[in-house]
Amino acid sequence: MSHSIVPAPASLLTDAVAGYISGARPGAAPLATEPDDLAFMALALEEARLAEREGEVPVGAVLVRRGEVIARARNRRETHGDPTAHAEMLLIREAVGSGTMGGGWRFTEVTLYVTLEPCVMCMGASVLARIPRLVYGCSDPKGGAARTLYQLGNDPRLNHRVEVVGGVRGEEAGDLLRDFFRRLRARPRGGAGP
């Protein structure tokens, strides 16, 4: 965005940031990780760090098919001035636009790795793209649509299911977000972006 970010009151940010935790929500089923999940989440964390350096909320994502990274993306909402420029949305667009998906929109045989639990928009896009597996880092108690607030990937009213694994490198992902918002709160009001 071309205009400044005005931080929310510290009490609201504190409550929101305090909820960025590792792992699945309390009482959720144990994690079902695969051997490469940690390595691919490390790549998503690299994207998140790049986003942070660019003044974006540090969220990164990678798309993997048969053990190969086919797309990488990070949050670009501020840069693009686009509220839909979440890492997951940009990743899906990149994979389709590059021809990596063979000219189709069905994302079979892929795993989406993202550092923060997807919101309703991103989880909906994952369902629509037929992404079979999603692995996320930290939960989002204010907007998580994979497990925390909603379970869109497992909603029987929808025509596709997404296997969801949460908490992979969740502490690290949560720390990035907590540190980012802590620094944002410390900035004088009306200053330039993060």
Image (spheres, rainbow, N blue to C red):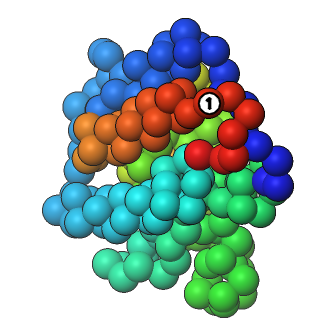
Instruction: Give the residue at x 82% y 47%.
Output: 3
In the shown orientation, is residue 3 left or right of residue 76? right
In the shown orientation, is residue 45 left or right of residue 86? left
Percent of width and height locating residue 94: 65, 77
Percent of width and height locating residue 132: 49, 58
Q: Nearer the viewer, residue 6 or 104?
A: 6
Work out whether residue 175 can be spotted.
Answer: yes
| Mark 1 surroundings: few (<14), some (14-19) or many (≥20) residues within 10 A | few
Residue tagged 1: 188
Q: Quadrant of residue 184?
A: top right
Q: Quadrant of residue 187?
A: top right
Q: Nearer the viewer, residue 105 or 179?
A: 179
In the shown orientation, is residue 105 left or right of residue 50? right
Instruction: Give the residue at x 36% y 58%.
Output: 45
Task: Name the element at disc 1.
Answer: loop
Q: Nearer the viewer, residue 36 or 88?
A: 88
